[in-house]
């Protein structure tokens, strides 16, 4: 009987106890490894006459193992351990495909909002349950780390840990940002580990193989690997090639073969059938509209409001004030951008302007000629007695008589509205970014339970999922369209069963009117396919500053002429629309790509 | 494991570890853990370190273990609250300072839902394994011997429960239970089932003598291993053939990608590309290579009546 040491490439295996492993040939292709560490321990206990364990626990231990035994290669085991999770059919079949047909290396390229995270979680859980994965690394943008940790813990019962300190890397399932992981001292630890599974979220950020992030990911050692992205191609077919090379180098041939075989122009594929073949074994793309996946409608209503005389007076005064400052500065934009905020705030609530004015007052020198001017504005504020928008909001809320979420950009407005609703005998709860997790959850509980109204200043990430609510009021609009999209995404998502009603409050004759016009009429934001927007914006904002900045500039430069302002904003709108039509090109590839990625058969549940 | 099985499992664990069950129903246990169970289940290494070093009498934790959530909640919530209302009440309670009733023992009892897949049950599994791995047991005699001078012969058996894993990029498992008589070297399968029908005790019963071992423990080990090997050799390995085929395909693909790269690489870049190439090949073997491993779940020496 020969006991050979374990030279096998089972990198993660228990090679530590290599002396206790005997190898036998079972079949020309398969060795049997006999782990004898138990026998050594038994002998040592016999030599010492104990300690001996309990018979009941012995039986229980066996019973537990029998319960956990994995009977078949195929059957999905993880679902029976997750009684609280109800994945959609397309998510289950995606997980199955990854596990059984793709050997655990795949690009999950579902359109935004179809639950790539759930699919990845299912795959991870299944591997954990089967004991095929112990160490897993999940690389995500920094802003999503906590959300991933929470989802894995709560939805999947996976003890995932957010990477914070150096020693965190030793946990079995770690979620980290790629930017942290690639830096010292983490880099060495991460590259020195054999990961059973690596998941990379927002993988389209790895499209360029020259970046340090891409180089870093190439060096990671991994058994299974999932790349998650809604947009495997943004501009260029090469991006897809680079992603696939991370998973399966050579799947599309070498770089030059790929170019020769599959690319006409960087955005136009050829030999699509072959490309489809090559892709179908590595990429899954579910799209809304595929069987079983459907979203409800978005019904958008703009509500034009006329400011009261006092409010209009304040708006005009503030506008005059801003213009004066701009003229004084001799056309210097950078310092002025914050002043534009004042104008936007007037459209929201007097409280919001007031807070900003007070801060401005504190910042100016005591003898500055600005100070009396600021006081003048405060006088205008004093005269305002009611808030037109708040009145209208109350009316809307009472009419719909269902749960509604109200978004505002400003803390002061939020406070005001809370007060306002309280005075009108309605329960409204606040939600804002600065709250800690516990408080956020508590507010969600309250809103789900007894409050009709939630007033939120923040919509970003952080898992506020409000499928139980299908009314949303934009009390004021952010100038950043992505944030508008995030707001809508809280309510209009998978699992929402009702059509979603969106109300935009819009004060006539103010900058707000222009913005609503731009976002709604011009770029048709509210009806865009989710996920389309960020790519359009990315291109639009190249070198020109963010849309917000461009809007502020236009506003300041228009010099008070309403017609001029209109024209300029229209131009901004047109260039976005133009980009959108151009961007339609790569999405056109993606449309064909649907056919390219694996079509998932979706059984519709009764 | 369904709810009933979980319930029974938990019950047996609590009794085996001398925990004090304060209250129970078919859907739950309220239990004050024994020190032994507390060490395994409460994740308080610092506390136990403190107790061990200072000799302070330990204060163990009390838990509400719910083994059937649905049943428990339908029993517990007489005036039925929807989960939303309950959540809202709890949230309001926190803010207003209203403390909900059910303050029987002055402290809040942490609740754990135990279902197959839950972390607490997994912890119970692990705890059972930690103190249920190696046993040395004697069969209790069927009936008292007639005279104190009559002695029943016993045979020592090596019993082992093996888990066999068949893995490539996928995996399945089997459990095999073997017993080898140390007197005769004969081997039986499903030994564990056989044991479960007997009453076993850690103490040597009176009027019993254990027959002399005919073979060494090491010999018994090889009897087990050979039996297992014989069994496994007759299995169908088409899954392994398929996995090997996938592996070969993958390796060929990687070769096809890297070989031209290496050929055209400059002297400076070559080592890095070669390293990457080898790494990819290694990963792929790791991913697909078919393998079968056998390891013990637990094992022991069992002294059973008769000479076999």
Image (cartoon, coloured by chain):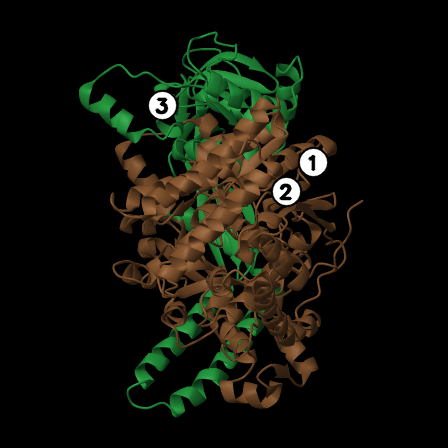
State the separation of the CA atoms marked 1 and 3.
61 Å
The circle on residue B36 is 3
Looking at the image, residue A334 lies above or below residue A292: below
Q: Quadrant of residue B85?
A: top right
- Mark 2 surroundings: few (<14), some (14-19) or many (≥20) residues within 10 A: many
SS type, badge 3: helix
Which residue ends up furthest to the top in the rendered image?
A: B104
Residue A548, x across and y down, in percent:
49, 60
Q: Nearer the viewer, residue A289 or B290?
A: A289
Give me the residue at 73% from left, 43% from top: A497
Give me the residue at 66% from left, 33% from top: A403
Q: Nearer the viewer, residue B7 or A81?
A: A81
The answer to whether marks 1 and 2 mark residues whose Cβ atoms lie closer than 8 Å is: yes
Image quadrant holding the N terminus of chain A, namely bottom left
The chain displayed green equals: B
State the separation of the CA atoms marked 1 and 2.
9 Å
Q: Nearer the viewer, residue B96 or A429?
A: A429
**Same subunit: marks 1 and 3:** no
Residue B86, x across and y down, in percent:
59, 22
The circle on residue A473 is 2
Which residue ends up furthest to the left in the rendered image?
A: B54
According to the picture, the residue beneath numbered tag 1 turns out to be: A396
Give me the residue at 47% from left, 33% from top: A382
């Amino acid at each position: 009987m020969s006991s050979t040491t374990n030279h096998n490439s089972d990198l993660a295996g228990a090679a530590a106890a290599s002396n206790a492993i005997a190898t036998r040939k079972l079949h020309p292709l398969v060795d049997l490894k006999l782990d004898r560490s138990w026998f050594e321990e038994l002998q040592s206990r016999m030599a010492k006459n104990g300690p001996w364990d309990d018979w009941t626990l012995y039986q229980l231990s066996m019973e537990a193992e029998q319960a956990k035994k994995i009977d078949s290669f195929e059957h999905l085991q993880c679902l029976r351990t997750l009684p609280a999770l109800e994945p959609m059919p397309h998510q289950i079949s995606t997980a199955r495909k990854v596990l059984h047909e793709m050997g655990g290396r795949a690009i999950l390229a579902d359109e935004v909002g179809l639950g790539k995270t759930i699919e990845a979680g299912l795959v991870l859980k299944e591997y954990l349950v089967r004991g095929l994965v112990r160490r897993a690394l999940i690389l995500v943008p920094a802003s999503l780390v906590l959300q991933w940790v929470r989802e894995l813990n709560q939805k999947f019962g996976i003890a995932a840990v957010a990477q914070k300190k150096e020693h965190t890397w030793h946990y079995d399932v770690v979620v980290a940002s790629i930017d942290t992981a690639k830096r010292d001292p983490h880099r060495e630890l991460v590259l020195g580990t054999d990961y059973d599974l690596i998941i990379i979220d927002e993988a389209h950020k790895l499209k360029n193989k020259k970046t340090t992030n891409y180089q870093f990911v190439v060096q990671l050692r991994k058994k299974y690997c999932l790349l998650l992205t809604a947009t495997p191609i943004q501009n260029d077919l090469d991006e897809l090639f680079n992603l696939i090379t991370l998973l399966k180098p050579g799947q599309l041939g070498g770089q030059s073969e790929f170019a020769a075989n599959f690319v006409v122009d960087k955005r136009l594929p050829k030999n699509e059938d072959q490309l489809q073949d090559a892709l179908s074994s590595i990429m899954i793309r579910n799209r809304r509209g595929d069987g079983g996946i459907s979203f409800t409608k978005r019904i958008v209503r703009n509500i034009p409001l006329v400011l009261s005389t006092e409010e209009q007076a304040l708006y005009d005064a503030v506008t005059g004030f801003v213009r004066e400052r701009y003229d004084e500065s001799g056309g210097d934009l950078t310092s002025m951008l914050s002043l534009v905020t004042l104008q936007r705030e007037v459209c929201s609530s007097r409280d919001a302007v007031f807070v900003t004015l007070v801060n401005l007052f504190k910042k100016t020198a005591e003898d500055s000629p600005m100070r009396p001017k600021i006081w003048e504005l405060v006088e205008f504020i004093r005269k305002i007695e009611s808030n037109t928008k708040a009145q209208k909001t109350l009316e809307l809320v009472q009419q719909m008589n269902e749960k509604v979420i109200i978004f505002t950009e400003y803390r002061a407005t939020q406070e005001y509205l809370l007060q306002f609703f309280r005075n009108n005998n309605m329960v409204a709860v606040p939600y804002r970014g600065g709250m800690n997790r516990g408080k956020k959850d508590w507010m969600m509980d309250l809103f789900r339970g007894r409050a009709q109204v939630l007033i939120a200043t923040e919509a970003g990430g952080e898992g506020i999922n409000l499928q139980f609510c299908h009314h949303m009021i934009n009390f004021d609009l952010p100038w950043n369209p992505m944030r508008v999209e995030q707001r809508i995404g809280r309510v209009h998502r998978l699992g929402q069963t009702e059509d979603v009603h969106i109300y935009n409050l819009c004060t006539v004759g103010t900058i707000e009117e222009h913005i609503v016009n731009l976002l709604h009429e011009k770029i048709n934001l509210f009806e865009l396919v989710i996920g389309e927007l960020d790519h359009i914006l990315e291109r639009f904002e190249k070198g020109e500053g963010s849309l917000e900045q461009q809007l502020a500039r236009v506003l300041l430069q228009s010099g008070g002429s309403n017609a001029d302002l209109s024209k300029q904003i229209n131009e901004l709108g047109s260039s976005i629309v133009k980009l959108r039509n151009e961007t339609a090109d790569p999405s056109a590839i993606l449309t064909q790509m649907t056919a390219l990625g694996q079509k998932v058969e979706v059984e519709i549940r009764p | 494991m369904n709810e009933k099985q979980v319930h029974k499992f938990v019950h047996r664990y609590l009794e085996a570890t001398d925990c004090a069950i304060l209250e129970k129903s078919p859907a739950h246990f309220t239990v004050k853990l024994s020190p032994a169970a507390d060490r395994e289940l409460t994740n308080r290494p610092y506390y136990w370190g403190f107790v061990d070093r200072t000799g302070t009498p330990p204060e163990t934790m009390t838990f509400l273990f719910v083994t059937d959530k649905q049943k428990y909640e339908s029993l517990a919530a007489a005036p039925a609250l929807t989960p939303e209302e309950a959540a809202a009440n709890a949230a309001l309670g926190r803010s207003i300072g209203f403390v909900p009733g059910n303050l029987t023992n002055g402290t809040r009892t942490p609740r754990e839902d135990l279902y197959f897949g839950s972390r607490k049950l997994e912890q119970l599994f692990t705890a059972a394994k930690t103190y249920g791995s190696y046993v040395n047991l004697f069969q209790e005699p069927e009936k008292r011997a007639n005279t104190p001078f009559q002695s029943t012969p016993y045979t020592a058996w090596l019993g082992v429960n093996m888990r066999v894993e068949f893995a490539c990029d996928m995996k399945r498992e089997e459990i095999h239970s073997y017993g080898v008589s140390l007197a005769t070297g004969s081997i039986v399968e499903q030994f564990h089932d056989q044991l479960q029908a007997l009453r076993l005790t850690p103490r040597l019963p009176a009027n019993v003598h254990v027959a002399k071992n005919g073979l060494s423990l090491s010999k018994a080990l090889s009897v087990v291993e050979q039996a297992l090997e014989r069994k496994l050799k007759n299995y169908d390995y088409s899954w392994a053939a398929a996995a090997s085929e996938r592996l070969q395909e993958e390796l060929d693909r990687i070769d096809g990608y890297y070989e031209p790269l290496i050929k055209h690489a400059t002297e400076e870049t070559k080592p890095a590309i070669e390293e990457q190439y080898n790494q990819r090949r290694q990963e792929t073997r790791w991913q697909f290579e078919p393998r079968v491993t056998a390891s013990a779940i637990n094992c022991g020496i069992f002294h059973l009546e008769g000479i076999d």
